[in-house]
């Protein structure tokens, strides 16, 4: 009996090995197998002594065409310590010159999860904050998995207890806060915002914000130059005028 079991295990292992070999032989060509014309330069940007990079989804060129604005998440993937509820004291908005030298930094204590960035025609810096500080309903403070009760994918707004986040901030080039859009802590439609992803200012001053980072909402909101709400369009789904994750914004000449 033991010999039969051993033989059976050996045959299964052999079949798995042959299957893996066949799969390896038929594996499709890598998506990024084409020649790469770019060169990665590590440590190009000079961070202050002792500071490391966090997750960075927001990068924009300054009006001078050379300097680079970056919004990063305080050396981690968030500027909020969810275990203590304390915000990081590190500035999350950084400006570098074309050689990678740090020129300016600000925004400490304001943004939990900087996500999108935009420099308007006047050189002002706009940044979206895509998360909140609500107590998380799962052990360890981790957000509930998608589809679970209370997860982002099953709700249109933040959890109870949210008092900051889900806003859009406008700064002057020297870091002065000029305007804030959205309710502190977020809000469900028709109010705003919940999970704002990106922001863009049109030549006439109109402000557009894309909203919905895996949550049950997915829309674009439009404001006038003074921050007054004008209209919104789009909803969650895969049909006409529906979107899944309106993640980034761009505008053509028309």
Image (spheres, helix red, strand yellow):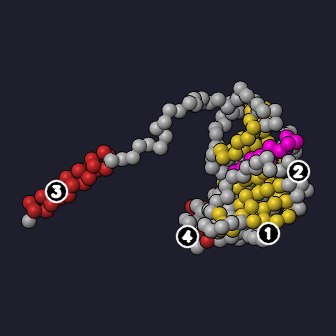
Give the SS element for disc 4. loop
Find residue 147 and name its label. 4
Give the SS element for disc 2. loop
Spatial separation of the CA atoms under disc 4 and disc 2: 40 Å
Q: Nearer the viewer, residue 130 or 85?
A: 130
Spatial separation of the CA atoms under disc 3 and disc 4: 40 Å
x, y percent for residue 244? 62, 63
Mark closest to the chain's N terminus, 3 or 1? 3
Mark closest to the chain's N terminus, 2 or 1? 1
User: Which label sits in the foreground, 2 or 1?
Assistant: 2
Tag 3 near tag 4, CB within 8 Å: no
Task: Determine whether 179 is above or below 100 in the image.
Answer: below
Spatial separation of the CA atoms under disc 3 and disc 1: 62 Å
Instruction: Tell me the magenta residue range.
Output: 114-126
Quarter the N terminus occupies: bottom left
Q: Residue at x 78, y 33 (%)?
A: 65
Identify the residue position indicated by label 1 in the image.
191
Q: Nearer the viewer, residue 247 or 149?
A: 247
Identify the residue position indicated by label 2 in the image.
204
Tag 4 near tag 2, CB within 8 Å: no
Tag 2 near tag 1, CB within 8 Å: no
Label 1 crowd bin: few (<14), some (14–19), many (20+), radius 10 Å: few
Mark closest to the chain's N terminus, 1 or 4? 4
Give the SS element for disc 1. loop
Q: Nearer the viewer, residue 231 or 124?
A: 231
Spatial separation of the CA atoms under disc 1 and disc 4: 23 Å
Find residue 11 and name its label. 3
């Amino acid at each position: 009996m033991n010999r039969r079991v051993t033989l059976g295990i050996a045959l299964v292992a052999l079949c798995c090995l042959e299957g893996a070999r066949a799969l390896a032989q038929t594996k499709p060509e890598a998506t990024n197998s084409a020649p790469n014309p770019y060169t990665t330069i590590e440590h190009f940007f000079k961070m202050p002594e002792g500071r490391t990079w966090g997750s960075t989804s927001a990068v924009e060129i300054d009006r001078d065409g050379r300097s680079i604005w970056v919004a990063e998440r305080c050396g981690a993937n968030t500027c909020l310590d969810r275990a203590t509820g304390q915000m990081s004291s590190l500035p999350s908005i950084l400006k570098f010159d074309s050689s990678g030298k740090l020129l300016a930094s600000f925004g400490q204590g304001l943004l939990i999860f900087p996500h999108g960035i935009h420099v308007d025609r006047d050189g002002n810096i706009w940044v979206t904050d895509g998360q909140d500080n609500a107590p998380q309903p799962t052990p360890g403070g981790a957000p509930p998995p998608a589809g679970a009760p209370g997860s982002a994918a099953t709700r249109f707004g933040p959890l109870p207890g949210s008092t900051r986040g889900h806003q859009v901030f406008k700064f002057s080039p020297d870091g002065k806060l000029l305007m804030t859009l959205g309710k502190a802590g977020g809000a469900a439609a028709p109010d705003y915002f919940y999970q704002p992803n990106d922001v863009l200012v049109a030549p006439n001053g109109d402000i557009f914000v894309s909203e919905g980072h895996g949550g049950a909402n997915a829309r674009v909101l439009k404001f006038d130059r003074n921050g007054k709400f004008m209209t919104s369009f789009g909803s969650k789904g895969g049909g006409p005028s529906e979107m899944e994750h309106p993640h980034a914004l761009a505008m053509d000449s028309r």
